[in-house]
Image: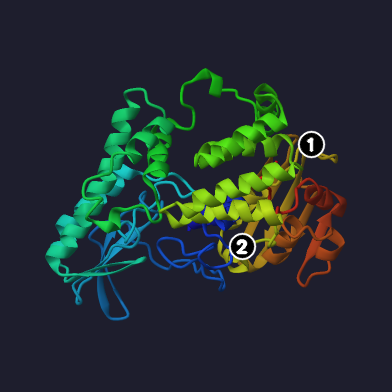
């Protein structure tokens, strides 16, 4: 629950916006548009929900009987997800490898954004699966792949994937310890295919890529900083773009260089130049058109479906503008998470620069959940605590948790919240309104391809 809510609520807005690029949700399916995601056709457009678990599996080898079916679990947390397990379906002699083995190289760090994953642990768990479970499995199945039948074939399939992640990890770390940067490592490993890559198609980069994963492994150990001081305090993108365009000789010179790179088929350099011109001059139509064209060519040439989607989504927004799709948060997801998680999420909306009173506390009582909580509104941070009311609250909001959601996230006026069934307010309602006014509204999108 903690990891599901952390990923989908705390960073949900930024992640969902980036995911629209990764999965090409605005693209029309077809030869020049969205053609899948590499591990499936695309994201479901159905209802998002979350049901809290009633039982927890904590260790490899634990068993449960679910609906009459005996299951044995392998804990693989820290691999494709921070909390994850594989399942051996005992009577059917079938091993479910979840998402740590599928018909494509997976992501050590997904482009939509998430916590970076541990490639070394990933390889270790695949090794354990290949030794402990595959030899007794008549079939190996996974979340994004067709079955692999036969014990020898299943063992070989899991072993090939193990070798792939191990190679990625070890060769990245080897070069990292020689002083190579993440970009240098990614470029080098792209030109040195891993063992079995030419014959074992499930290790190829139809979803994750060698380039992206090598950078992720570098980040896992050393972070984003490459130890070059010029990159320690570089200018932000727009300011840097203006200075770079000026240094290159102005807009027309930069555009000419970008066009020349495009004509020579160097779409990476063309897009680099054109992107800086667009950030320096967002209304430069010719630069935006050229940038869209260079992105499209890189998308058409990408083996990874999600790299293709990102390039083509960027081109689509440059040509057509951004379409905001509103909030992507699920009501069921919000309802299922803890009140402490909600208060922590509200704290990420706190805007200290907004005018209004500071240095007061608000009490919260949620009778239907048997919970009491407090919010301290300081000058620089908002601190929420579940367990007891503050000593001297300026106001107390008592009622169902949806009233708290309406005040903090929907930003309904206090007088409207006060009229909701079961709601009472003690103390000064103006201080409740001051709390709500100190929070930013839930964001619904942001620019990526333009400043």
Seen in the image, is 160 located left or right of residue 405? left
x, y percent for residue 204: 32, 53
Q: Which residue is drawn at 41% across and 55% down?
A: 207
Looking at the picture, how far across and down is residue 150, in whole percent?
Answer: 15, 69
Residue furthest bottom as drawn:
68
* Nearest-to-viewer mark from 2 and 1: 2
- Secondary structure at badge 1 equals loop
The x, y position of residue 420, in whole percent, is 79, 70
- Left or right placement of residue 288 versus residue 312 in this view: right
Along the line of sight, the residue nearer the viewer: 42 or 360:
42
- Identity of the residue drawn at 46% across and 64% down: 36
Q: Nearer the viewer, residue 78 or 156?
A: 156
Could you tell me if the residues under marks 2 and 1 are in contact, i.e. CB atoms within 8 Å? Answer: no
The mark that comes first in sequence, 2 or 1, is 2
User: Residue at 86% across / 52% down in the picture?
Assistant: 428
> Would you say residue 272 is visible in this rendering?
no
Corner quadrant of residue 408: bottom right
Q: How many marks?
A: 2
The quadrant of the image that shows the C terminus is top right
Tell me what residue is drawn at x 39 percent, y 43 percent: 213
**Mark 2 surroundings: few (<14), some (14-19) or many (≥20) residues within 10 A:** some
Q: Closest to the observer: 247 or 98?
A: 247
Residue 282, image x, y percentages: 74, 41
Q: Nearer the viewer, residue 177 or 206?
A: 206
Q: Is residue 343 above or below residue 148?
A: above
Q: How crowded is mark 1: few (under 14 residues within 10 Å), some or many (20 or more)?
A: few
| Mark 2–mark 1 distance (CA, rounded to whole Å) | 35 Å
* 166 horizontally vs 34: left or right: left
> Could you say which disc has been placed on residue 372 in the image?
none
Q: Can residue 165 be seen in this view?
A: yes
Residue occupied by mark 2: 26
The residue where tag 1 is placed is 353
């Amino acid at each position: 629950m903690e990891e599901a809510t952390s990923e989908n609520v705390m960073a949900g807005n930024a992640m969902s916006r980036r995911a629209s690029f990764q999965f090409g949700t605005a693209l029309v399916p077809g030869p020049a548009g969205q053609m899948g995601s590499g591990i499936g056709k695309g994201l479901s457009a159905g209802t998002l929900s979350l049901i809290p678990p009633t039982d927890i599996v904590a260790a490899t080898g634990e068993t449960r009987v679910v609906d009459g079916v005996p299951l044995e679990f392998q804990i693989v947390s820290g691999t494709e997800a921070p909390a994850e397990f594989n399942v051996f379906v005992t009577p059917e002699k079938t091993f479910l490898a979840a998402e740590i083995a599928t018909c494509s190289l997976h992501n050590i760090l997904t482009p939509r954004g998430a916590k970076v994953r541990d490639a070394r642990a990933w390889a270790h768990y695949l090794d354990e699966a290949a030794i402990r479970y595959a030899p007794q499995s008549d079939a190996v199945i996974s979340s994004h792949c067709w079955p692999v039948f036969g014990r020898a074939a299943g063992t070989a399939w899991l072993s090939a994937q193990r070798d792939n992640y191990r190679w990625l990890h070890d060769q990245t770390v080897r070069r990292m310890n020689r002083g190579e940067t993440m970009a240098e490592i990614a470029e080098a490993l792209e030109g040195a295919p891993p063992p079995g890559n030419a014959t074992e198609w499930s290790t190829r980069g139809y979803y994750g890529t060698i380039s992206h994963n090598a950078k992720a492994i570098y980040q896992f150990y050393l972070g984003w900083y490459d130890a070059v001081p010029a990159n320690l305090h570089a200018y932000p993108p727009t300011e840097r773009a203006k200075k770079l365009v000026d240094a290159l000789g102005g807009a027309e010179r930069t555009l000419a260089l970008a066009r020349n790179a495009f004509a020579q088929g160097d779409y990476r350099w063309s897009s680099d130049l054109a992107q800086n011109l667009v950030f320096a001059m967002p209304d430069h139509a010719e630069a935006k058109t050229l940038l869209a064209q260079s992105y499209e060519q890189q998308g058409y040439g990408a083996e990874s479906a999600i790299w293709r989607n990102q390039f083509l989504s960027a081109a689509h927004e440059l040509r057509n503008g951004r379409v905001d799709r509103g909030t992507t948060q699920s009501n069921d997801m919000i309802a299922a998470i803890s009140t402490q998680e909600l208060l922590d999420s509200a704290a990420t909306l706190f805007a200290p620069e907004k005018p209004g009173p500071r240095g007061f506390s608000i009490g919260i009582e949620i009778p239907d959940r048997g919970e009491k909580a407090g919010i301290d509104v300081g000058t620089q941070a908002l601190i929420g605590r579940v367990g007891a009311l503050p000593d001297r609250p300026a106001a107390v909001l008592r009622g169902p948790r949806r009233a708290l959601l309406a005040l903090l996230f929907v930003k309904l006026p206090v007088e409207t919240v006060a009229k909701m069934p079961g709601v009472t307010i003690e103390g000064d309602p103006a201080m409740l309104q001051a709390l709500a006014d100190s929070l930013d509204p839930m964001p619904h999108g942001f620019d990526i391809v333009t400043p």
